[in-house]
Amino acid sequence: QQQVKQSPQSLIVQKGGISIINCAYENTAFDYFPWYQQFPGKGPALLIAIRPDVSEKKEGRFTISFNKSAKQFSLHIMDSQPGDSATYFCAASKETSGSRLTFGEGTQLTVNP
Amino acid sequence: NAGVTQTPKFQVLKTGQSMTLQCAQDMNHNSMYWYRQDPGMGLRLIYYSASEGTTDKGEVPNGYNVSRLNKREFSLRLESAAPSQTSVYFCAGEFGTGAVYGYTFGSGTRLTVV
């Protein structure tokens, strides 16, 4: 059972455009929602994270939008660059440290020059 | 400071063979995790260890065993490899506390079972 569902599976965006990746979760006990970025041949790396007490978090060109009532959250990449081409994973967990992250299926983003 | 180191990077096994994937961290992580990554399925948790000497099953533990003999090392063993275990395996250590925490992943082991 996939507790965190992610879409789209793949995304192609032109340089300078906005990339949007969506995730939906089922477990209302989840209270921590990070996004990970993975480049080919590397392990995923933490990109940005949000807790449900805020509806938006922004770090540079990356923004997480969170809708608690809909149990959805999304990653927006503004002014997308070819260097942003990677696989992105959303995730969720119930607790803080010591918890187990449940990951979405992943989105392969390609930003064309 | 290497972070999380996995060995080997690549491995080909025949069905029925056994092997151990090694993971070592130098970041003083208490919790460590083993995930497998398959196309379209994201990262699925195999086993995790909250502290030295303790391990627990994750989402897909069948066919695997783990060992956490000390704080630095967390190994994953396949006793009798099957083609369904062809995957990329990632070890991770947990960092941070409270408001922000996350995983430091190794670079992965790409395993093919023929």
Image (cartoon, grey):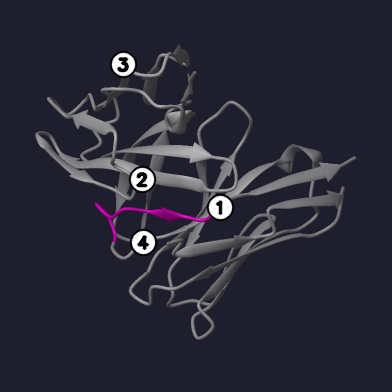
Q: Main secondary structure of the magenta part?
A: loop
The CA distance from mark 4 to mark 1 is 15 Å
| Amino acid type, residue under disc 4 in the picture | Ser
| Amino acid type, residue under disc 1 in the picture | Glu
Q: Which is more foreground, mark 4 or mark 1?
A: 1
Please report contact status of discs 4 and 1: CB closer than 8 Å, yes or no.
no
| Amino acid type, residue under disc 3 in the picture | Met
The residue lying furthest to the bottom in this view is A69
The CA distance from mark 3 to mark 2 is 19 Å
Query: Is residue A27 visible in this depiction of the protein?
Result: yes
Q: Quadrant of residue B36?
A: top left
Q: Which residue is mark 1?
A: A105
Mark on residue B19?
3
Q: Which is more foreground, mark 3 or mark 4?
A: 3
Could you say which is closer to the camera, residue B5 or residue B59?
B59
Q: Is residue A102 magenta?
A: yes
* Chain letter for the residue marked with disc 2 in the picture: B
- Sooner in the amino-acid sequence: mark 3 or mark 2: 3
Q: Percent position (x, y) of residue A77?
A: 71, 57
| Amino acid type, residue under disc 2 in the picture | Leu
* Chain letter for the residue marked with disc 4 in the picture: A
Mark on residue B45?
2
